[in-house]
Amino acid sequence: MRAAPAAPALPGDLLATVACAYPDAVALVHDGRSFGYADLAERVDRVAGWLQAHGVRPGDRVTLYAPNSAAWVQAYHGILRGGAVVNPVNAMLTTSELAYVLDDCGARILCTTAAVLAALDDGVLSRLWAVVVLDELSPGAGAEGVEIVALDDVVSAGHAASPVALGPEDPAVIGYTSGTTGHPKGAVQSQRAVLLNWRLSADAHGKTDADVVVTALPAPHVYGSVVLNGTLGVGGTVVLMSRFAARAAMDLAARHHATVFEGVPAMYAMMLAEPSLDPADLATLTRCTVGGQTMAVSTMTAWERTSGAPLIELWGMTELSGLGTTHPVGTERVHGSIGRPLPGMEARVADLDRPEVEAAVDRPGELWMRGPLVMTGYFGRPDATAEVLADGWLRTGDLVRRDADGHLWVVDRCRDLIVSGGYNVYPAEIERVLSGHPAVALVAVGPVPDEVRGEVARAYVVLREGHRATEEELVACARAELAAYKTPRSVVFVPALPQTSSGKIMRRMLRELPAGRE
């Protein structure tokens, strides 16, 4: 193992700093192509220089909307290197959802794929200065008044980045969360919070320059971000998958002698169910991590027995720039527990009846977090910020309990969140879309169990008098406006929805409704 690289001052300095220590080491492998640290850092610097030459200044927002790729990594770090604020958007969102985010954060440059560019309407494009296409640029693509350029041409242009003056509390990332009121909110993550979470997460899981990490986690998601950037920060190698496939993941682990695999529960379940599973393919793994949702202990033990590697649970959220709790390597792991807070973070289990009081041992309460990883607020949403931030404490909305040994356990979610395959789905977003259908009088959305994804969304619909609609029609309505993982997997027609005396829908009672049609 080589000497550890110096600590970067800002997230945008990470690759340049590591490249000074490990210039020839392999930083990234994607789609059969490898990038050394010096090469990757040079590409990132040129992206940063191009952005600066095109008027991007510190604090300006640049949106990144594309699947995992080496180009995605170059754009992400180039935006940070140039002093701008990166707005990584889940590539599974629809173009209408993307348009909302672009408007909300005021981004004027978009980094995306040729296919997305072709799908954007002129109204969206007219609000942008430029679009950087991360894959192959189609001839004639573009819109009047908007510069369209391929990332390869940006790199070839050879602009060198100028130093930027940023402080630790300046914004680095705006990550959008699913919206409890029907629209997402942008959590503003500071330079310090982003860089610190990368480092603390890597430290907790014992990462070094000797590690080779295979991951298919979406890079825009905070879990995917800390896996990717925490590994790069210590000089390790990231083998990045564009999308997860069980056989392909195991092949990559075997081919690259992977030491770490990181994923959500569904990925482990799919690999265990793969008929061609050969434990020899996983023989080099020394540890794995799992987050995004709770995982059955039986599945955890089955994976550990098959791979021979410990499976480390974690918990995090966008408002914390990544992880908030985990089991550090070398400490006792308790299956089913999300561990303890990262160093420097405080966790409080607030009593549900008296939030100012800590809940008793093993009694559920709302998890509050405080410390340097907490977001500065929701972009342009002071009221929404005030609802979750007070005296430095972040009200996470998750119900947890703390056992006598100090381990935290997730019990439920306070805000009706559905976690499907590791993705957050808020019922209000689906309800907002379906309520616009002319046949729908009332709609409520709740979770139902799913063997692969943990849980999926189901819509319970009361039809307007004299109107008819089919399940297929309403699912198609949702699919047209929402990302695939948010689209309800089933629709149940009911005569009425459970309501409180004030008329609020009681989502907790939806599971008691009959599963059949009216």
Image (cartoon, rainbow, N blue to C red):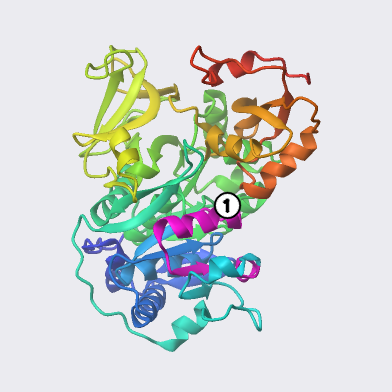
Nearer to me, 357 or 441: 441
Q: Amino acid at mark 1?
A: Leu
Asked which quadrant contains residue 465, the reply is top right
Expressed as whole percent of the image width and height from the top left, the position of residue 371 reads: 21, 39
Q: Residue at x 46, y 45 (%)?
A: 184
Outermost residue on the bottom side: it is 157
> Relative to 252, is 383 above or below?
above
Expressed as whole percent of the image width and height from the top left, the position of residue 161 reads: 31, 80
Q: Going by the image, does 332 lie left or right of 166?
A: right
Q: Secondary structure at mark 1?
A: loop
Q: Residue at x 36, y 75 (%)?
A: 48
Q: Which residues are magenta?
A: 90-118
Q: Going by the image, does 150 lie left or right of 335?
A: right
Residue 3 shows up from this direction: yes
Q: Give the number of callouts.
A: 1
> Relative to 38, is 488 above or below?
above
Expressed as whole percent of the image width and height from the top left, the position of residue 433 reads: 62, 41
Nearer to me, 175 or 500: 500
The answer to if 109 sits in the magenta stretch is: yes
Q: Residue at x 55, y 21 (%)?
A: 507
Query: For the C terminus, which image quadrant?
Result: top right
Q: Going by the image, does 311 lie left or right of 373?
A: right
Q: Which residue is mark 1?
A: 93
> Relative to 132, is 385 above or below?
above
Query: For the N terminus, which image quadrant?
Result: bottom left
The answer to if 377 sits in the magenta stretch is: no
Nearer to me, 195 or 82: 82
